[in-house]
Image: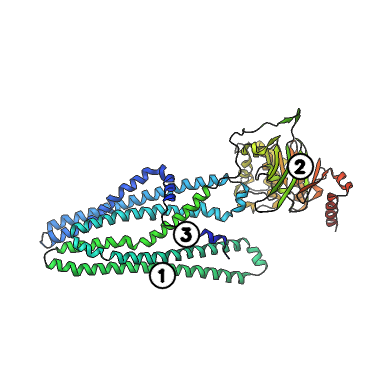
Amino acid sequence: MTRPEDHDEILGKAYDARLMSRLWAVTRPHKRLVLVSLALFPLTAAAELLQPYLVKVAIDHHILAGDWEGLARIAALFLVTLVALYALRAVQAYVTQLTGQRVMHDLRQALFAHLQRQDSAFFDRNPVGRLMTRVLNDVEAINELFTSGVVAIVGDVVTLTGVVIILLFLNWKLALVTFALVPVLALGVAYFRLRARESYRAVRLELARLNAFLQESLQGMTVIQLFAREPQEAAAFARLNGGLRGAQFRSTVYEASLYAAVEAIGSAAVALLLWYGGGEVLAGALTFGGLVAFIEYTSRFFLPIRDLGAKYTVMQAAMVSSERVFGLLDTPPSILSPASSAPGPSPASRGGAVAPAVEFRDVSFAYPGGDWVLRHCSFTIGADERVALVGPTGEGKTTIARLMIRAYDATEGQVLVGGVDVREWDLRALRRQVGLVPQEAFLFAGSIRENLVLAGDGAVSGAELARALERSQAARLVASLPEGLDAEVRERGVNLSHGQRQLLAIARALIYNPRVLALDEATSSVDPESEALIRAAMLELLEGRASLIIAHRLSTIQNADRILVLHKGRMRESGKHAALLAAGGIYARLYELQFGRETA
């Protein structure tokens, strides 16, 4: 069976002109750094290639001639060349790293901004782990393109070109002896490159499987311990870990074989040079220093080729990561503000009457690839009206709240806020107008204060905070903490109870102060004491605004101005609590079933 992570690890070409063009577009703002790096290549190559020639001069003109004073000058020049080479390499490494880091910064900024514009359906399709891999790992692989990939290859090409020119200049016959082994070397590199490519893909695939298993196991550790599945999970982890180890070993074998093959061919080239070049020295056609320099240049000729396998892997990984990153950036949000939208449409009127705060007109909705969740739903919520929405689990109650804030677009029909279709609103203005307190209150890591002012764009006075905490029944909670508003909130608010998180979410909504508010199961999964506090906070929160209250506990919505009953995706009943009970319909049955459970 093909898993999702299998598709993520399919490898492409090591060079793609289209992707390189897009990478250059991202790099263009930092072109000065690129130009500096390019200017350093010939200087670095010159400093490196000058050394064997200095050795030749030292041997032929000074050592063999017994000129120790001249030898000292050559040695000093050789030392200066070494210092210059290491200085140039240090500067080049710094510039390339700086370029890569800046490009990484820009790409991550662009990706995060792009993700913030995506709609809820996008996050339904794309797991969080995969998106984090795009923003972190794939961008890091692109950084390797600058530090160890294309930059290193450009440097190698400059060096190889210089070596070839010098070898031909020194002695073209000896140069041909060296070049005679290049076809054999090319065949060997091509063979091991293909094998290494497959082994690299296997490593990435096994690593992806191990990561997926580890993430799932850590998230479900409580269930593993509850059912005493530690031995089975350990065995499964050992199997996946062993698969990764085997893939790594195979990859290492191919990389080592490539290194060994290049070293062997390079040694064969040196042996040929000693045999043929020695004869040239004896015949007087070549100096001894020239032969030594030739051997030095030959080693510099084969060194970049030996490292080709590693650079090929880096380039290949960078191209794959670039494809993923640009693929994500090319995914347009399906929900956008219209180009001509006003910052916030004023409530429309029909026949002189103020339009409802919220109106659903014959709305039908289905999630991509799924069945219809809502079918021809129509209802209104007045400006100061409290409307409750009830129905069995999975009937689309939360979907209605999401349609109000345009987390999704209705498949058919219209959703209107203030008499204006939500598709005509500026998204930011719409979500300032319509707020949502979800069933699971989400708190960010930080302080309580930071989580509360999140709703007020940071410009919230101490008096406003105190008033919101008092009205939300959260003042006592904050007062009980030693640090008060500066108390630490851990990731997802795990150091607070569900009820405490819900009270803080209500306080946050009071600060946000939208004209329309949807509360999704605000009292679910809490103890009676917390429920009483949340219900009191809800009364304050709903005061003076239009509201939609989604609830399973029917006791919490008996005083609603109107109750809507959703069943099988359709609005089946509408009315007050007493009238719906007297009608003996779906609401009455739900109430009877729930009342029986509560008194059992």
Q: Position of residue 187 (x, y in %)?
A: 34, 66
Please, what secondary structure does the residue beneath circle 2 have? strand
For the image, the number of numbered tags is: 3
Amino acid at the residue labelled 3: Leu
Tell me the amino acid under the disc marked 2: Ser
Label 2 vs 1, first from the N-terminus: 1
Q: Marks 1 and 3: which is nearer the front?
A: 3
Residue topped by disc 1? 253
Res. 490 in view: no
- Check residue 378 in the rendering and tell me which mark sits there, or answer none: 2
Q: Name the quadrant of the C terminus.
A: bottom right
Between tags 2 and 1, which lies in front? Answer: 2
Q: Is residue 117 left or right of residue 181?
A: right
User: Considering the image in quadrants, where does the N terminus appear?
Assistant: bottom right
Residue drawn where x is 10% and y is 61% of the image: 66
Image location (x, y in percent) of residue 451: 62, 45
> Foreground: 173 or 80?
173
Badge 1 element: helix
Q: CA gap, disc 2 to disc 3?
A: 50 Å
Q: Residue 11 shows which numbered tag?
A: 3
Expressed as whole percent of the image width and height from the top left, the position of residue 235 reads 58, 71
- Between the residue at mark 1 and the residue at mark 3, the CA separation in whole angstroms equals 20 Å
